[in-house]
Image (cartoon, rainbow, N blue to C red):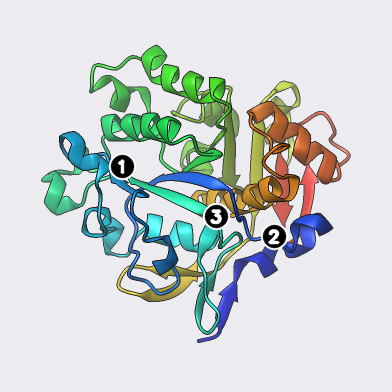
Amino acid sequence: MPVFNWLEQVKSILPADWQNKTGKGVKIAVLDTGFDLSHPSLAHHDLDGHKFNTGLPGDAKLRGGMDDLRDRYLNKGHGTTGISLLAGKSTTDGVQGIAPDVELFLIKTAKTFAEAGNVSDLYRFIDFFEGLQLAKDLKVDFVVTSFTFDETQINRFEITKGEADLVLNALAESKIPVLAAMQDYEKEGSFQHLSGKFFPSWHGQVINASYVPKPLDDRFEFLKDDPGIHFFVENLSGQGCFIREQIKEVGPSNSLSVYVMAGILALSFEALGPENSPRSRAAVRKLFEQHFPKSNTAGKTGLRVLQGNPILV
């Protein structure tokens, strides 16, 4: 199987000085279901001190090995696929990600069915919450996640909405942007509804990404006065890594959108250099406003990627 190169899928929309970058020197914390690093395209991310599992007890969560990162989401994986889009590396066959040379700090914040014992404990907010705290301590350039939690899931662990937001406030104060997924539009029916319902996307300092199944229209009018950043991605698909060293088709989804945008953001950080990299959400917004053309719907915010043609909307 020939190499599937994700950079080639988005290269035409990138500024020229980003196109030859690989993400080198950029540190990213990824919070997801787990990561199968036995896949040849991901083996270069199997590094000591870069693997964590917040579901483990005590200090064990800080000494995660490959076995502790096992990814069994729906028996195919999720985090495994995501990081292959972002940072896979292959020269012969496999998956080449958008930014293969980024330094990934992999944080598993979900359990397998065998570990959890019941569905409600598969994705516990407390594990995710600790993962965000860990990301702050790691002093990464930015955080990536496609997990979302409603207030009921948060309150289950006697954590209030305000307390949950404190960890995002701390990341913002440390100038560590968070790139996260909005909830599924098709299930919820309105992005306006979504933007205020789920953690972490409800927080004003979070950069949101989402798959848009239909053309943008007046459903997005609420964004005109929204100071946040929202990346909307349409009709992008390709090949990705799955568990057990498999490579399969990856269709359009919120998760794909998050990891593709994470790769683009990593290239921008490298292009600007560590002294100029956008170390805040406001700086990220300014960066994309400078480098991508605006549409006729100026005043809205976000990046729309439609078959290789980006516009700020």
Whether the residues at callouts 3 and 2 have beta carbons within 8 Å, the answer is no
Task: In the rendered view, tell whether residue 77 sits above or below residue 3.
Answer: above
Secondary structure category for the residue under label 1: loop
Q: Position of residue 100 (x, y in %)?
A: 56, 63
Q: What residue does disc 1 label? A: 109
**Residue visible at 73% across and 50% down in the picture:** 271
The earlier-in-sequence mark between 1 and 3 is 3
The answer to whether one can see residue 241 in this image is yes
Mark sitting on residue 102:
3
Relative to 175, 249 lies left or right = left
What residue is shown at x 22% (from left), y 47% (from top)?
111
- In the image, taking residue 124 as reference, residue 268 lies left or right, namely right
Q: Which residue is drawn at the image coordinates 37% and 75% (left, top)?
A: 246
Q: Mark 1: which amino acid?
A: Thr
> SS at mark 2?
loop
- Mark found first going from the N terminus, 3 or 2: 2
Name the N-terminal-most of marks 2 and 1: 2
What amino acid is found at the position of numbered circle 3 in the picture?
Val
Q: Quadrant of residue 306?
A: bottom right
- Spatial distance from mark 2 to mark 1, Cα to Cα? 30 Å
Circle 3 crowding by C-alpha within 10 Å: few under 14, some 14–19, many from 20: many
Of badges 1 and 3, nearer the viewer stands: 3
Report x, y in % for residue 121: 19, 39
Give the structural element (helix, strand or loop) at label 3: loop
Residue 216 visible, this orientation = no
Residue type at mark 2 is Lys
Q: Which residue is mark 2?
A: 21
